[in-house]
Amino acid sequence: ESMFSCESDASKVALVHLVARLRAGGFRLLDTQFLTPHLARFGGIEISRRHYHRLLAEALSYRAVFSSTLPEDAGGDPLAVLQSSTLTS
C-alpha cells in the first residue's frame, strides 16, 4: 500500500477508502500479500495458506460489487462505512 503517492501518508488514506468501498460492496476478503505494521493497525493478520484458501472459497461464494461511490447513507464518508460495518478484518 505504500508503493505510490506524492504526498506523505497518501497511500494510507487510499487504503482506508479502498477498504470502505470493499466493505460497502459486500467483499469479504482483502489479500495484502504481506503484513506491515500499518496493516496490522487496521486489523490485518497473517494466516496460513490453507486458511487463506478456505476464506477465499467462502468469499467467492458471495456476490460483491465494486462501486465508484460509497452508499448514500454513509454520506460519502469512508469512515462511516467502516464504523457501521459488522465484518471482521
Image (cartoon, rainbow, N blue to C red):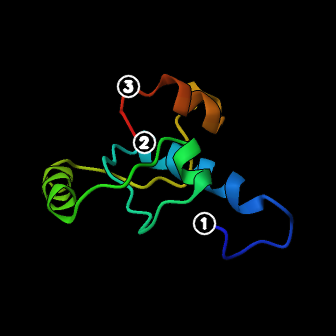
* Residue in view at x 55 percent, y 52 percent: 39
Q: Identity of the amino acid at label 3?
A: Thr
* Residue in view at x 60 percent, y 28 percent: 80
Vertical side of 22 occupied by 43: above or below: above
Q: Residues within 10 Å of mark 2 (few under 14, many from 20)?
A: many
Quarter of the image where the C terminus is located: top left
Which residue has dot 2 on it? 23
Which residue has dot 1 on it? 1
For marks 3 and 1 on the same chain, the one whose residue lies earlier in the sequence: 1
Percent x, y of residue 25: 39, 45
* Residue in view at x 61 percent, y 47 percent: 16
The answer to which image quadrant residue 18 occupies is bottom right
Seen in the image, is 61 located left or right of residue 63?
Answer: left
The secondary element bearing badge 2 is classed as helix
The secondary element bearing badge 1 is classed as loop
Kindly indicate whether the residue at mark 3 contacts the one at mark 2 (C-beta within 8 angstroms): no
Q: Residues within 10 Å of mark 3 (few under 14, many from 20)?
A: few
The secondary element bearing badge 3 is classed as loop
Which residue has dot 3 on it? 86
Q: Identity of the amino acid at label 1?
A: Glu
For marks 2 and 3 on the same chain, the one whose residue lies earlier in the sequence: 2
Seen in the image, is 32 located left or right of residue 20?
Answer: left
Distance of mark 2 from mark 3, alpha carbons? 9 Å
Distance of mark 2 from mark 1, alpha carbons? 18 Å
For marks 2 and 1 on the same chain, the one whose residue lies earlier in the sequence: 1
Q: Identity of the amino acid at label 2?
A: Arg
